[in-house]
Amino acid sequence: MALVGVKGRSVEVEADVGNGLAGIHLIGLPDMALSEARERVRSAMVNSHFPWPDARITVSLFPASLPKRGSQFDLAIAVAILGAAGVVPADRVAEPFFLGELGLDGRLRPVRGVLPSVLGAAEHGDVTVVVPAANSAEAALVPDVKVAPFTDLRQLVEWLRRGDDLPEWHIQDAPEPPRPTIQPAVDLSDVAGQPVARRALEICAAGGHNLWMLGPPGTGKTLLAERLPTLLPDLELDHALEVTAIHSVAGILPASSPMLSRPPFVSPHHTATAAAIIGGGSTVIRPGAVSLAHRGVLFMDEAPEFPRHILDSLRQPLEAGRVTVCRAAGSVTFPARFMLVLAANPCPCAQPQDQGESCQCSPTMRRRYLARLSGPLLDRVDMKVTVARTSRRELMADRQFVEPSKTVAERVLAARQRAAKRLAGTAWRTNAEIPSAALHADYRPSDAAMKCMTTALDSGTLSARGLDRVLRVAWTLTDLAGKPRPEDTETSTALALWLGVNT
Amino acid sequence: MAARNDLGKHGEQLAVNYLEAEGMTIIERNWRCRHGEIDVIAEDGPNLVVVEVKTRSSRSHGTALESVRPAKLAKLRMLAAKWLTTQPRAFETVRIDVIALERFAGDYSLQHVRGAI
């Protein structure tokens, strides 16, 4: 299997042992790592006490036009040569998919991108996939695929020669139900004194909306954002597979948990490059932060510190839910439907401004600082919240109102279920995903509820896209309140959240 | 050193016997110039055959056949051209063959690759 983006394409490996000067020739656009496969395969076979044919060996990888990269073809090449040399019956090696890197001693080493590869193999119907034992848990996540894990080449050859079914201990159970792997160590109840921001976070979690928090340092913006994942429900199976596939391609899947069942939380530093955020790479195109945050949260702390072009490059994935990366090697589309959370200080000096005397920044400096968050980007942010510094009295008073993440997560789950029920039969699950056309056709609130928005639209404070975003938030508020349709309260609250910060 | 030379000499003799049995005419053996040496030069009908003979006493350092690398073949090709310039006659084609001999329990196995380039 070759990986193109997060899709697996099947590759056929043929080997011919023929007359000519001894040597091995590898054709079919291999890269450096794959060209070195000949040395690995040779050593692995010799050290596993299999005869290495003293003849001219030609190994061809089809389709010939697809560039192949990486070491996951080692096993397929070895098996093809063994088949051509007559060590294993050729008809036994024709059917299964082989995936894995070979150690010099013949051990099978784990590779990255197993899940998308096996998913690609599953498209060919009822197949058997041979994987390194260390990758078996990841491969077993895919339904309707027979997974045959092996630890070394000898073991595999014995199985191929015997020609019977997988030995008892090889049979994998159906994927166990995904369990939460990250126990939330952080809790929303840690954040006192920011009731508005906490509420905004809840709405954000319930509808999958984007959020911008503006406020002086030390008010809990980062604290709040880091607690957003604790409010989100577990990923559904198909989403979990998507997320796991992306992380598998990036090679950052933890060995302990093959399936990511919790929404990811990605927080890139503001010195990150465009390629790190969007995805890129000259030979292998890897997913960036926006794709790693797929179905999760992308948190950009100190948003105005990010280079402008990076912030603006988020505009396309925010609208489309996917990102297409074009390089000389080809173009690849990665899924990128994430919740964007921005945090910003009101000015570069970040001194408290409400007391008046300490901030030295001129109005121009402030305007220039926040202008780095461009209008089109902010137009795509559904909710904007000012996080103000709180007094001791407010902190103490708010202590009794803080709720643990668990309580809020239950409300969020209930709201999401209501939205999912309403959207049943469509491709969307959260309010943030509803496209504009459907929003105005099927999910249009009453004229009375729309009044505040039409006024804002007429006066020019609300853009057409902004209207859609306000409508989506209004629906989420409706879901949280358990009402059937948005009313005046919901729409005006949503509009206030959209207009949010006045800069 | 002497033992190794003997092994090579013996291997070359075996190769020459084999080539003659195949119906080829040996033109020259161990032709040397300042650039190197051609083990056997033979004639196969209208074709000129330049033969590299490689003999190994065991497989402990790899097989005899695989020890002939592309660089060696390129050198043989160059030497063949040099040799041809010294000859008055012309051949239809020029072929480079490799004969690999390996000693097993006192006996030799022989592998003949025709037209390595």
Image (cartoon, helix red, strand yellow):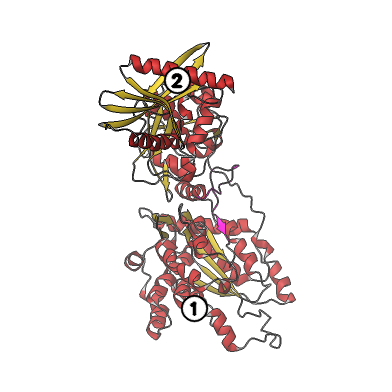
Q: Relative to residue B32, is residue A360 drawn left or right? A: right
Residue A133 in the image, given as x and y percentages of width and height: 54, 33
Residue A222's image quarter?
bottom right
Of residues A316 and A105, the one nearer the viewer is A105
Instruction: List the residue tagged with mark 2.
Output: B12
Of residues B92 and A389, the one nearer the viewer is B92
Q: Relative to residue B52, is residue A217 drawn left or right? A: right
Q: Is residue A403 above or below residue A83?
A: below
Residue drawn at point x = 51 percent, y = 35 percent = A39
Q: Is residue A190 above or below residue B74?
A: below
Residue drawn at point x = 45 percent, y = 20 percent = B12
Q: Quadrant of the C terminus of chain A?
A: bottom right
Secondary structure beneath dot 1 equals helix
Residue B113's image quarter?
top left
Residue A203 in the image, given as x and y percentages of width and height: 52, 65
Instruction: List the residue tagged with mark 1.
Output: A499
Q: Relative to residue A435, is residue A344 drawn left or right? A: right
- The amino acid on which the numbered mark 1 sits, given as a three-letter code, is Leu
Of residues B99 and A372, the one nearer the viewer is B99
Residue drawn at point x = 56 percent, y = 31 percent = A107
